[in-house]
Image: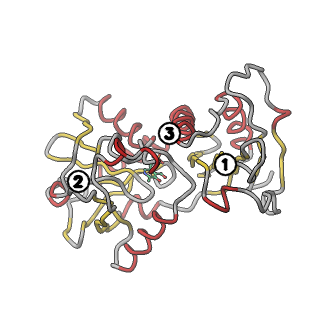
Amino acid sequence: MTRRFALMIDPAASDDVRADFADTFTLVDAAAPALSVGELSTQRGDGVFESIGVVDGHAQEVVPHLERLAHSAALCDLPLPNRAQWHQAIERAAEHCEAGEYVIKLILSRGVEHGPTPTAWATAAPASDFTAVRERGIRVVTLDRGYDLDVAANASWLLLGAKTLSYAVNMAALREAHRRGADDAIFLSRDGFVLEAPTASLILRLDDRFVTPAPNGGILHGTTQLSVYEYLTDRGLAAEYARVPASDLSRADAAWLVSSVRLAAPITAVDGVELPVDHALTADLNRYLLSPRD
Ligand code: PLP
């Protein structure tokens, strides 16, 4: 069995109801070139993607990931993905994942310049080891995102809320965080509200309630944050969406960055100010996030 896997997908129309999409999949060598030089995903970052965690062969939170892929495609005027086809592609990719943690990526690109259809593919590969980050935690710095919280409502072409392939800004923010001696960053809006991290959602505990920035303010709606909220509300805890002022960061009783592959990383300091870490809850959250979930 190979540890790396790549499958090209011939995108079916969203209303195609056939039971088996096997003939729309082409297995390719994950180490060999597979894309045309005219690909708009590589030329312009014009496309959308998802990263799905896989634990012991089980792809996690598949439904929320497929919902977000469809949402991102709609925001980018890409053809709506066929849910069953992508589901089957994920199943094929998951079959190639061995014990331990893997990541499946789904990519839907605008396609080749002047070409008739989008390009789509799925990959699977071993995940980086986040054990230490989940246990020891991370130091973060706040960085200006450069726009106000309500910009998404007034400028849909910024594609905020879509998980697009244009991650150069997010990667630059991570490099800036490293330059400032931190592990990660939290973006703040110009008008002083907390947004998200370059590759994760933020959850704060303020007294006995949990708070995360509402996903209508130009951020991604994280699938991991949704799972954490399910875990918390099932236990009778208050978990809310809100406008979170930047001043809430330093007064938080605990805080986490959460995302599909890293899972829950406790924040130990924001801009050099130490934060309390709830080690017991962090361990519970990660145990839950590592259990099989759809
Ligand atoms: N926000 C951004 C900008 C991200 O890139 C990600 C994940 O990559 C998230 C939030 C968290 O999303 P998820 O929990 O679905 O991985």
Of marks 2 and 3, the one in the foreground: 2
Q: Quadrant of residue 134?
A: bottom left
* C-alpha span from label 3 to label 1: 31 Å
Which callout, 3 or 1, points to the residue nearer the camera?
1
The numbered mark, 2 or 1, whose residue comes first in the sequence reads: 1
- Tell me the distance, in whole angstroms, between the alpha carbons under discs 2 and 1: 32 Å
Measured as percent of width and height from the top left, residue 73 is found at: 57, 39
Of residues 288 and 275, which is closer to you in this image?
275
Query: Three-letter amino acid code at disc 3?
Result: Ser
Q: Which residue is mark 3?
A: 291
What type is the residue that disc 1 sits on?
A: Ser
Secondary structure beneath label 3: loop
Q: Residue at x 30, y 35 (%)?
A: 232
**Helix, strand or loop at disc 1?**
strand
143 versus 29 height, above or below: below
The residue that mark 1 highlights is: 109
- Residue 292 in view here: no
Residue type marked 2:
Phe
Q: Is residue 256 left or right of residue 112?
A: left
Q: Position of residue 3 (x, y in %)?
A: 74, 56
Is residue 96 shown to the viewer in this render?
A: yes
Residue corresponding to mark 2: 193
| In this view, 269 is above or below 292 | below
Q: Is mark 1 within 8 Å of ligand 1?
A: no
At a point 35% along the width and 44% down the height, the residue shown is 154
Q: Is residue 129 left or right of residue 217?
A: right
Examine the rendered structure and indicate whether residue 155 appears above or below residue 199.
above
Front residue (pair 229, 145): 145
Which badge, 3 or 1, comes first in the chain's sequence? 1
Horizontal arrangement in the rendering, residue 39 relative to residue 190 (left or right): right
The residue under the point 69% across, 22% down is 15
